[in-house]
Image (cartoon, helix red, strand yellow):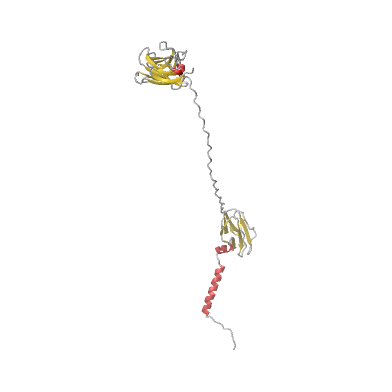
Amino acid sequence: MTTGKRWTFLPVGMLAVAAALLASALSLHDTASPASAQAAGGNTVEVGDDHFAPQTITIPVGTTVTWEVAGSHGHTVTSDTGVFSSGTTPLTQGDTFGFTFNQPGTFPYYCLFHGGPGGVGMSGTVVVTAAQSHPTPVPSPTPMPTYAPTPTPMPAAAPTPAPAPSGGAAGSSITVTLGPGRDGSQPGTAMLMAMGSETEVDINITPGAAGVPQPVHIHDGTCDTLGAVQYPLTNIVDGKSTTIVALPLSSLLTGNFAINVHMSQAEISTYVACGTIPASTTQTAPVTQLPAAGSAGLQGGYSSRGMSTWWYVLLGAGAVLLVSGATVLRKARVRR
């Protein structure tokens, strides 16, 4: 038995359809678009007969563009601004020209034989974009722990001792009676209070005309023999005045000063009240002999301070009672 190959014969109509499909596929391959050529070539520009494909290419800075001559004619790649050039000798089919773009910008070019600057005829453009910067992230500083400083205890300041008052113990006072003046009568009182090296003078008299200031001064001398003004005091208004005199009370208790009140500034020569500041005197009768122990009786004298009189009463065993009238002020013991 002889085995032979079997041949299958297609109808003539089917063969015609197959031939048409094959021809269409070949035609599509030959007429690929410039965009497809760029996709295939990346940063490559095809130099065809009378065109560059793609006509405009966009690349990042630092990229090299390569032009490949595919047409049958000779061409050049010449920059409008002279940045790059393939020369004046035409590139022929299969030749290439490359240029690296290190500056961003727009770079037009053309073919010397088939185009011109400014986009005339066979021309193209390279657009170079600036490289995108990616800043290096700066790490956030690690916060340092905060430590509150331990407060240093301050040593307690020793209290400053008050200076010993001069001119009389602070708070001690004397009251001066203000009688009628030489020309009128607005009687009252003036209280002089010791304030160490100063003296407070508070005056309270029968008020004169409402709201009218009445000058008042401390004069040399007495009310009978008024001398020059030594210490002006605050004007009396409605019967009252308070002044701080920069002089210790003891310096005023000499018997040579008087407080004199005037009717008003307009009637300064009219005196309506006056009082002589008394001298500070202390008189004590000497005790020549202390009584025997167990006996009692009035043996002392008196001390005059302002308007008060103090009596010393010596008792037995050296004890002393200090009385004013019928009031016991102090009890003390006298050294023998």
- How far across and down, in percent of the image, does residue 263 sit? 37, 16
On the rendered image, what quadrant is the N terminus found in?
Answer: bottom right
The answer to whether any part of residue 23 appears in the image is yes
Q: Nearer the viewer, residue 330 or 315?
A: 315
The answer to whether any part of residue 193 appears in the image is no
- How far across and down, in percent of the image, does residue 89 sit? 65, 60
Q: Nearer the viewer, residue 115 or 164?
A: 164
Q: How many marks?
A: 0
Residue furthest to the front in view is 294
Q: Is residue 200 left or right of residue 114?
A: left
In percent of the image, x 56 and y 68: which residue is there?
Answer: 29
Relative height, residue 141 to residue 110 (above, below): above
Q: Quadrant of residue 232?
A: top left
Relative height, residue 165 to residue 104 (above, below): above
- How far across and down, in percent of the image, does residue 304 sit? 42, 15
Residue furthest to the top in view is 225
Q: Quadrant of residue 332?
A: top left
- How far across and down, in percent of the image, does residue 51 sit? 57, 62
Q: Is residue 203 left or right of residue 82?
A: left
